[in-house]
Amino acid sequence: MSYYEKVLQPDEQVRFVGRLHWVIHKNAILFVILALVFGIVALGQANDLRIAAWFAAAGCMALAALSYLGSWFRQITTEFVVTDKRIIHKVGWISRRTQEMNIGKVETVDIRQGIPGRMFDYGTVLIIGIGIGGSWEPLTGIASPLALRNTIVVG
């Protein structure tokens, strides 16, 4: 059972469940591509260089696996939910950090998207609330940030 399901009030309705975009796995993807390059180089080399290239390819694959595990764990332990009453953000598994804000206390929702973010529909979301300490840290790597913004603003 996810965190937000545990903290929902009986009369509260979920309007949007956010997720992190696949782009958070970019380091793992780059390491796999590098491993493929080393593998192709190994196929066309002499004996000594071939062994070195295979070791480089294996090292890159190991780094890709470690990088993927880290970003995958971040992805499954991050929750972002908009209900009809509040916004809930949870990060972590054993050590958990949560943030909640009433929908009525939201002043602004800022979206930052570069060119890749516009192309692949991800970005950074900054929620600014009313009053002192009403702002959250930027939420990076959020998939469909405009849909999230629209759900909060219309809510």
Image: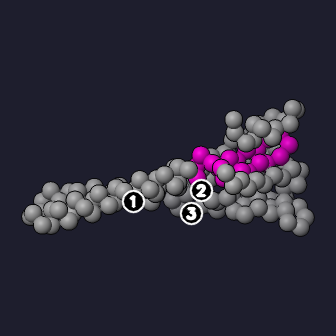
Q: Tell me the kind of residue under disc 3.
A: Gly
Q: Is residue 21 above or below residue 38?
A: above
Residue 55 seen from this side = yes
Residue ranking furthest to the left: 46
Residue ranking furthest to the top: 10
Q: Which residue is mark 3?
A: 114
Examine the structure image and report whether residue 82 is included in the region drawn in magenta. yes
Figure colour scheme? one colour
Residue 91 seen from this side = no
In the image, residue 146 lies at what x, y percent? 67, 50
Q: CA distance from mark 1 to mark 3?
A: 27 Å
Q: Which mark is residue 124?
A: none
Check whether the beta carbons of the residues at disc 1 and disc 2 lie within 8 A of each other: no
Left or right: where does residue 119 sit relative to residue 94? Answer: left
Q: Residues within 10 Å of mark 1 (few under 14, many from 20)?
A: some
- Residue 51, quarter of the rendered image: bottom left
In the image, residue 90 lies at what x, y percent? 71, 51
Nearer mark to the viewer, of 1 and 2 = 1
Left or right: where does residue 94 sit relative to residue 49? Answer: right
Q: Secondary structure at mark 1?
A: helix
Q: Which residue is mark 2?
A: 141
Of the image marks 1 and 3, the number of the one nearer the N terminus = 1
Which residue corresponds to the image point at 78% horizontal and 54% vertical from the top-left?
A: 99
Left or right: where does residue 155 sit relative to residue 95? Answer: right
Q: Tell me the kind of residue under disc 2.
A: Gly
In the image, residue 144 lies at what x, y percent? 62, 48
Residue ranking furthest to the front: 94
Q: Secondary structure at mark 2?
A: strand
Q: Tell me the kind of residue under disc 1.
A: Leu
Magenta segment, which residues?
74-93
